[in-house]
Image (cartoon, rainbow, N blue to C red):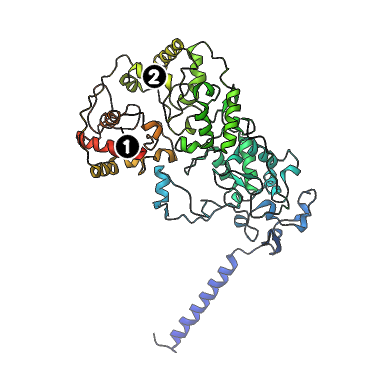
Amino acid sequence: MEKNTPAFRRFTYILVLLLTLLLLYIIWVTPRPDVQIKETRFIIAGIPIKERCISCHNLQKHSAVSGHSITGESCTACHDGIGIGVTKEIAHSRTAQVSVPKTVAGKNWRAVLRTGDTVPDLPKGFTGEHAQQLLAGGDTSAACIRCHSPLSLNPDLPVVKGFTAFSEAGCAQCHAISGTSSGATGPALDTIGDVLSLPTLKKRIKIPQAVLYSRMPVLLLTEEKIHNIALFLKGQSKKYLRKTAYIIPQKSMDTIEGANCLSCHTVNETGNTVAPDLSFISLQRSSEWVTKFIARPSQMRTGARMPSFLLSNASLLQNNLFSKTGTLSLPSSPARQYAQLCAPCHGEKGNGLGEVAHNLTSSPRRFEGNAEYFRLQKTKKLRVSLEQGIQGTSMPPFNSVITETKLDALLQYVLDTKVTPLPFVEITDMHVPVKQKASRIWGEVLYILNCKKCHGSDGAKSSRLITRKEYPLPRNLADTEYMKQLSDADLFKAISRGIPGTRMKAYGIHLAGTSIRVKRSFSPVSIWSLVDKVRNFSNVQH
């Protein structure tokens, strides 16, 4: 089409008209704000704050707050949210725009969540959600402690109850909050309210290992206490206006009450079932052993979740503990003895999932549906485990707690009622060949290809797993106390024929009478090479 012709000019006019109509239509249908944008500005803790809340909200209708000027103070200081937002979705921060990192500790993040693998920590600033979700109703009490000490507030406020629960649950023993607590085992929580939303804080308190590995134990708290503690933590923010710090009331760390031991442990039927019952500890452990464990729990047991204490306090605390234990009367029937001594770890049904089980560094033995293990073990060995305990685990000795006759009756009760189906016939264990000269390099290769996935590159992956499946966790091969009681022959058998009732498959032979799957058929010299490799993790030689 030639230019400057009538046809071209007609086409141009029509095109301009259509574009004009389209532009008018777009302008007409585009949503226009039905409110006038109004903005207020504040400086909170030295941080400039812009807010447009009054564009939609009539402050005259806001309920009165004693000692506060509704029209003269920041909204986000109490309610959080994104004050500069001009839409409800953004201002109330109900939807999150999250940038998921491609890698976390060298691993794909989504793959980590899918496989339940281990993650040391999230990248700085990444939470997977929007931390500034709007606080409304009673939840706004979280913001009160940004300006006021909880000691000066109404004790019935949820956030004040949260401060009390935080203190009583022993949280301050592990976590530091500037001017409040000085725990060093867990991460500092000074600004945790700026990082995690209230719903996420509640989830992390209720199930600490739901997403990330955490040494924090599963605390048996009511939903109300969990919510209140989450509110107290939500109040820990950079929006910090308090002029004076508030210290958690200090108690004498020389007593089990002052050290908050009863927040986790039970002593003489008083306390909690988060950690093992200590009612008979003075009959089961030496004073030196208990003192060392109190002072350095992670050195005594790899992955221990208990916080450490000063050595001077540890000795006094041990004396106080011993003065109050060892006197509780045991019930006479094996069933009630099992309920008191065994069920907290092994479970009422013997499934290895007692209330304490998930907080232990090694999984309690499973009785239910694990007859093959008990058919493989000699009754004498089981009896010795009851008498002397199992080093490197939470299984204590019971020879000073219960008489020999009652120990026999208790063992028989477990075999008769918890081990199903009943172990009528013992399984003859395999013969272990004479140890052969092993290859260090070949042992390394075999371990990487076959063992690393479950046990980890350092042999201690089980102490860092996020999830705990139905069967016991893989053994912590770096646990010196446990590994030194195993002979090389014990390790050879465990690798060669596997271990019943666990995920440990056989890598040598199929043992008659068991259902353990043979995953590989290694030669004896290859298995001996693996034995030497496993020994290196705990530096124990036999």
Comes first in the chain, label 1 or label 2: 2
Most foreground residue, 231 or 270 = 270
- Tag shown at residue 8: none
* Residue furthest out toward the right: 67
Residue at image x 63%, y 35%?
253
Going by the image, does 212 lie left or right of 381? Answer: right
Q: Residue 224 location in percent, x, y?
A: 63, 35
Going by the image, does 403 lie left or right of 56? Answer: left
The part of the image, by quadrant, that contains residue 325 is: top right
Most foreground residue, 231 or 475 = 475
Looking at the figure, which quarter contains the C terminus? top left
Task: Name the amino acid type tagged 2.
Answer: Val
Residue at image x 57%, y 39%?
310
Looking at the figure, which quarter contains the N terminus? bottom left
Going by the image, does 45 lie left or right of 416? Answer: right
Task: Name the amino acid type tagged 1.
Answer: Arg
- Tag shown at residue 384: 2
Q: Is residue 381 above or below residue 108?
A: above
Q: Residue 54 location in percent, x, y?
A: 71, 59
Q: Is residue 541 above or below residue 200?
A: above
Residue matched to label 1: 535
